[in-house]
Amino acid sequence: MKRERLVSLPIALGLSVIGFIYYAMVFVVIDGWMGLGTSNGLMNAAAFTALAFMSVLTYAMAIAGDPGHVPSSFAPDVEDSDGTLHEIKRKGGDLRYCQKCSRYKPPRAHHCRVCRRCVLRMDHHCVWINNCVGHSNYKVFFVFVLYAVIACIHSLVLLVGSAADDVHMDQHQNGGSFKTTYIICGVLLVPLTLVLTVLLGWHIYLILHNKTTIEYYEGVRAKWLAEKAGNTYRHPYDLGVYENLVSVLGPNPFCWICPTTGHIGSGLRFRTSHDSFLPTMSR
């Protein structure tokens, strides 16, 4: 289903913050501290520009990209002899079927009430991209958060370094607008860096365990029920740290920080810990 609006208020706000921080860092902080004509100033401006470009590029890809939809022809093959895992309803044990979409749900798929459709390997619906984070755009979303965190840390280092240099040199001749820019940047960057760093850490944890946010919370309940019955629960898609990284980020470690998605497969079937003899890639 096509979204009515590609750009929402949170997206416009996010882009405005990115634009302001970029302008302030390059043309106020770096230029005022090092000078854009110096080698240090030029190198920092070039590095920050590259980080800002990758942040905006991956942000746009996460916004515009399809998170992964269930094909209308999809139907679970219960007679498949390859050991495919079929997820069932908690009550009744029937195969998962979406009454709103009128089709079966593949493993790890969930219905999004905002997007009004089922999303493959759904992680969550994000208001900041006005889109779901799912099978097809999860890596892009993760890489965006990674670049955003690095850019924020770089910004804070530049901001603190410039402010410390001003204090050390006792330079009070800067105008009010110059100081105001510093204050606004600090107010924006400190909470933004904290929030994005926590978000990055959370998704690193999820990737290392090959879970989605939804599966994490489902797993908490499943583990409690298993322990209550005297059993041991293990997430079925947890293949081990390296295999989990490969299944989400791709087989080439040098491409893990690139917004590439050629390795992800169809999203209709995933390798599990019960069939480790299958190929590494999800099919």
Image (tube, rainbow, N blue to C red):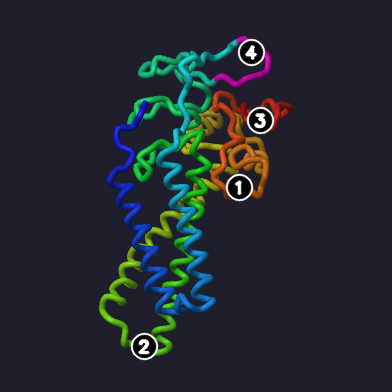
**Residue occupying image coordinates x 56% and y 38%:** 261
* Numbered label attached to residue 80: 4
**Residue occupying image coordinates x 40% and y 63%:** 22
Residue 93 visible in the displayed image: no
Q: Quadrant of the N terminus?
A: top left
* Numbered label attached to residue 256: 1
- Measured in 3D between alpha carbons, the distance from the residue under mark 3 to the one under mark 4, in whole angstroms, is 17 Å
Magenta stretch bounds: 79-86
Bin the neighbour count of mark 1 within 10 Å (Cα to Cα): few under 14, some 14-19, many 20 and up.
some
Q: Which amino acid does label 2 sit on?
A: Gln
Which element type, helix, strand or loop, lies under badge 1? loop
Mark closer to the chain start, 1 or 3: 1
Label 1–label 3 contact, CB within 8 A? no
Q: What residue type is labelled 4?
A: Asp
Mark closer to the chain start, 4 or 2: 4
**Rendering coords of residue 218 (x, y %):** 48, 32
Which marked residue is nearer to the observer: mark 4 or mark 2?
Answer: 2
The quarter holding residue 196 reads: bottom left
Bin the neighbour count of mark 4 within 10 Å (Cα to Cα): few under 14, some 14-19, many 20 and up.
few
Label 2–label 1 contact, CB within 8 A? no
Bin the neighbour count of mark 3 within 10 Å (Cα to Cα): few under 14, some 14-19, many 20 and up.
some
Which marked residue is nearer to the observer: mark 1 or mark 4?
Answer: 1
- Measured in 3D between alpha carbons, the distance from the residue under mark 1 to the one under mark 3, in whole angstroms, is 23 Å
Residue 263 belongs to magenta span = no
* Numbered label attached to residue 44: none
Mark closer to the chain start, 3 or 2: 2
Q: In which quarter of the image is the C terminus?
A: top right
Viewer-side residue, 191 vs 3 = 3
Label 3–label 4 contact, CB within 8 A? no
**Rendering coords of residue 34 (x, y %):** 46, 79
- Measured in 3D between alpha carbons, the distance from the residue under mark 1 to the one under mark 4, in whole angstroms, is 33 Å
Question: Residue most toward the top?
Answer: 79
